[in-house]
Image (cartoon, rainbow, N blue to C red):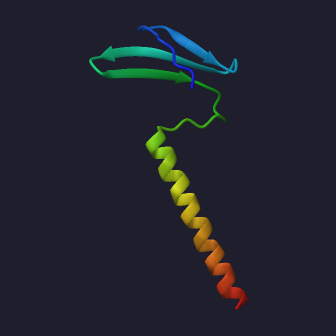
Amino acid sequence: MLALSRKKNEALVIDNKIEVTILEIKGDQVKVGISAPKEVPIYRKEVYLQIQEANKQALETESLEALKKIF
């Protein structure tokens, strides 16, 4: 993991496509702005993990249904 220090209104660029800007700092909260191409999905980590779990469960359910059809 790369750890960087940034101040308000400072940014960093990832892969020449994604720009992350520090918009506001209030106490222990930081507001971040992200500019990226539309085809790049951006999720909060907790939402991303929920999506991954839902996809895993859907795949398991589909596999079970497919097995039931065979037998």
Q: Residue furthest left?
A: 27
**Relative horizontal placement of residue 39, taking residue 45 as reference (left or right):** right
Residue 17 x, y percent position in the rendering:
67, 21
Looking at the image, residue 65 lies above or below residue 56: below
Up the image or down, 52 lies above or below 70; here it is above
Horizontal arrangement in the rendering, residue 9 relative to residue 58 (left or right): left
Give coordinates of residue 26: x percent, y percent: 29, 17
Give the residue displayed 65% in from the left and 74% down from the top.
Answer: 63
The quadrant of the rendering that contains the C terminus is bottom right
**Residue with the most extreme bottom position:** 71
| Numbered circles on residues, count | 0
Q: Position of residue 39 (x, y in %)?
A: 67, 35
Q: Residue at x 44, y 44 (%)?
A: 46
> Seen in the image, is 31 located left or right of residue 61?
left
- On screen, 19 above or below 38? above
Instruction: Indicate the quadrant where residue 61 lies.
Output: bottom right
At 57% across and 26% down in the image, what residue appears? 1
Residue at 62 percent across and 66 percent down: it is: 59
Q: Residue furthest front?
A: 1
Is residue 2 shown above or below 63?
Answer: above
Q: Position of residue 68 (x, y in %)?
A: 65, 86
